[in-house]
Amino acid sequence: QKEVEQNSGPLSVPEGAIASLNCTYSDRGSQSFFWYRQYSGKSPELIMSIYSNGDKEDGRFTAQLNKASQYVSLLIRDSQPSDSATYLCAVPYSSASKIIFGSGTRLSIRP
Amino acid sequence: DVKVTQSSRYLVKRTGEKVFLECVQDMDHENMFWYRQDPGLGLRLIYFSYDVKMKEKGDIPEGYSVSREKKERFSLILESASTNQTSMYLCASTPWTGTYSNQPQHFGDGTRLSIL
């Protein structure tokens, strides 16, 4: 079992709809969870951090965390063509200064 | 804002050459990382450093070495470049806050390296 798992996609969502991206992780001791957006040919860009169970909202983005289920998700409301990118879920090791990245979900917003 | 600067965006080298990739961060971060990213394989950790002159192997260290002589600078060295090292190389940094695992990594723009 991979330590951080994401559906690779591609996930195709119509413009204006909600895109839902999911991630599961295996380290029960993990305390921090991050979502990165990566455009083709560019480096990953941090878009959300979440540390506590529940929802965290930032503009059109909402991160949801459920530590009991070892599950973190990212919702993008009112999806725009500019949201088309690969989204990486990242979970730091609980016992080292390293981060495990999921393989990413490719999101495509169709006009 | 954290600034991580990689010395080159694009680099073309020949097989057998010794290649240096440089990374500098301006936020006094203790931890620095080198990754490579290939289609379908995601981000793979090559080496990381948690202090000056300290280094640890990541998941794919073979064929690479690193140097950290100053806190702000972390260099990746391809001892004898091979075509299978053609890739996007990403440098990242994060601070040490007294505990593990609560800080995101900040990435440079990446270096697209081609070995001919």
Image: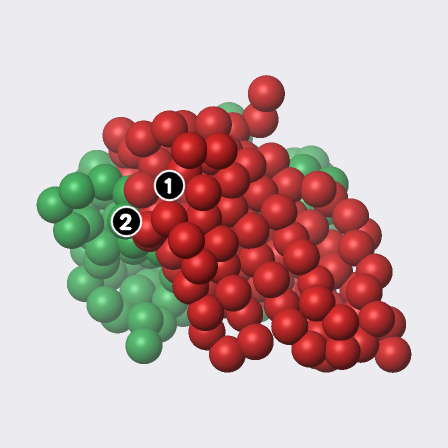
Chain colours: A red, B green
Which quadrant would the N terminus of chain B be assigned to in this image? Answer: bottom left
Closest to the observer, A24 or B13: A24
Q: Is residue B105 above or below residue B41?
A: below
Is residue A30 among what the camera can see? yes
Q: Is residue A42 above or below residue B38?
A: below
Q: Residues within 10 Å of mark 2 (few under 14, many from 20)?
A: many
To the question of a shared chain for discs 1 and 2, the answer is no
The disc labelled 1 sits on which kind of residue?
Answer: Pro
Q: Using residue B40 as the reference point, say whether residue B108 is left or right of it.
A: left
Q: Using residue B105 as the reference point, say whether residue A96 is left or right of it.
A: left
Identify the residue at horizontal 80%, vertical 70% (top origin).
A109
Q: Using residue B96 as the reference point, say whether residue B113 is left or right of it.
A: right
x, y (%) of residue B63?
Answer: 52, 30
Closest to the observer, B97 or B33: B97
Give the residue number, with chain letter if any, for mark 1.
A92
Looking at the rendered structure, the number of numbered marks drawn on it comes to 2
Identify the residue at horizontal 40%, vertical 59% (top origin).
A49
x, y (%) of residue B54?
Answer: 21, 37
Q: Residues within 10 Å of mark 1 (few under 14, many from 20)?
A: many
Is residue B64 among what the camera can see? no
Identify the residue at horizontal 74%, vertical 60% (top origin).
A107
Closest to the observer, B62 or A110: A110
Q: Is residue A88 above or below residue B40?
A: below
Q: Kindly state the secondary structure of the residue where label 1 is placed.
A: strand
Q: Disc 1 to disc 2, how far (Cα)?
A: 7 Å
Give the residue number, with chain letter if any, for mark 2.
B102
Q: Using residue A34 as the reference point, say whether residue A103 is left or right of it.
A: right
Residues marked 1 and 2 touching at CB (< 8 Å)? yes
Mark 1 belongs to chain: A
x, y (%) of residue B18?
Answer: 51, 44
